[in-house]
Amino acid sequence: MNIDPLKRQTQVSSLQQVVSKREDQNPSGDEEGMRLDVKTHENLMGQLNEMPESRPDVVALGRKLAEDPNYPSDDVLEKLSEVLIDVGDGSFTSM
């Protein structure tokens, strides 16, 4: 089973890329380009509003994992602890 728990974020990101491309295509900022950007924005917002707030398949997976006493595995916990240690000493700079 291939589940993308970040599907909504990925879709929003791809929508933002479309908007960025539109802005790049109209660097002069003329009125017609602005109208096109407004239409694009409205279209993208409509698509975003049609997306479900929650995905039942991901909710079901979360519930299943929450009931599993072996989740997360020792390997995952070890990796997580390494990341937390790195954040604690200030070496993690992606935030």
Image: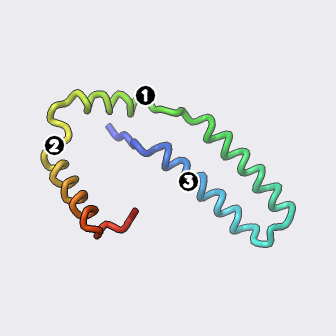
Callout 1: helix, strand or loop?
helix
Give the vertical position of 34 relative to 26 (above or below). above
Q: Residue 50 sits in which quadrant?
A: top right
Q: In x, y percent, where is residue 24?
A: 69, 68
Using the image, tell me which numbered label, if any, was put on residue 14. Answer: 3
Residue picked out by circle 2: 73
Q: What separation in Å lies between label 2 and label 3 (alpha carbons)?
A: 32 Å
Marks 3 and 1, how far apart at CA: 22 Å
If you read the primary sequence from the N terminus, does the residue marked by circle 2 or circle 1 appear first?
1
Give the residue type that dot 1 points to.
Pro
Q: Nearer the viewer, mark 2 or mark 1?
A: 2
Q: Position of residue 66 (x, y in %)?
A: 26, 31
Q: Residue at x 21, y 61 (%)?
A: 85
Do the CB atoms of the residues marked 2 and 1 lie less than 8 Å apart?
no
Q: CA distance from mark 2 to mark 1?
A: 24 Å
How many numbered marks does the figure carry?
Answer: 3
Amino acid type, mark 2: Ser
Secondary structure, mark 3, is helix
Report the quarter where the C terminus lies: bottom left
Q: Residues within 10 Å of mark 1 (few under 14, many from 20)?
A: few
In front: mark 2 or mark 3?
2
Measured from the top left, where is residue 83 in percent x and y?
24, 59
Q: Which mark is residue 56?
A: 1
Question: Height in image: 74 above or below 61?
Answer: below
- Label 3 crowding class (10 Å Cα cut-off): few <14, some 14-19, many 20+? few
